[in-house]
Image: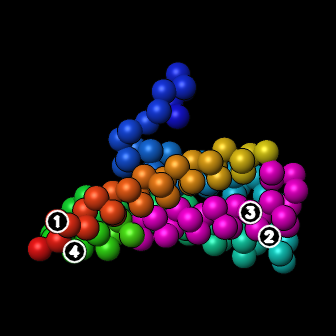
Amino acid sequence: MTDTGERQFDLAERTAIFAERVIELAKTVRLTAVSSPLVKQLVRAGTSVGANYLEADEAGSKKEFRYRISLCKRESRESQYWLRMLVKAIPEAAEPSRELWKEADELTKIFGTIYRRSKGNEK
């Protein structure tokens, strides 16, 4: 979402904003033996969504495009998982994590749709 509440349809920008928001959340979490690995995994997954989207956008073949899009979907789903685990470990993180979880869910659906629609175009 942009500041005006409009949906962001530029996926490169949208995934970059998602990654930035994940990083901002990670910076607020008090690191413990439990939270530290969860935060690391969340940051890896959350920042990988956009990186893989950029790779998909530059793919040299339909097969490579589909593979990169599938990674985007997987990383956004993984982000949801790590957000859930982070909230379990640090209940105070629930509120800031909620919007990120929703965005990761939307991204998962978007990339799933792109993947399915690109299926017949492999060659």
**Relative to 26, does residue 74 appear above or below in the rendering?**
below
Name the residue located 63 percent from the left edge and 72 percent from the top edge.
Answer: 41
Query: Could you say which disc has been placed on residue 35 in the image?
Result: 2
Comparing 102 with 21, the one in front is 102
Residue wearing tag 1:
121
Q: What residue type is labelled 3?
A: Arg
Amino acid at pointer 4:
Lys
Looking at the picture, which amino acid does disc 1 mark? Asn
Task: Answer with mark 4 or mark 2, whichever residue precedes in sequence.
Answer: 2
In the rendered image, the residue lying farthest to the right is 91
Q: Position of residue 114 (x, y in %)?
A: 33, 57
Q: Which of 41 and 76 is in front in this view?
A: 76
Whether tag 3 and tag 1 are in contact, CB under 8 A, the answer is no
Mark 4 = which residue?
Answer: 63
Q: In this figure, which residue is indicated by the disc labeled 3?
A: 84
Marks 3, 1: nearer the viewer: 1
Write the residue at 25% across / 62% down.
Answer: 118
Q: Which residue lies furthest to the left in this view?
A: 123
- Residue 72 place in picture, x, y as percent: 43, 64
Indicate which label's residue lies in the foreground, 4 or 2: 4
Q: Are marks 4 and 2 in contact (CB under 8 Å)?
A: no
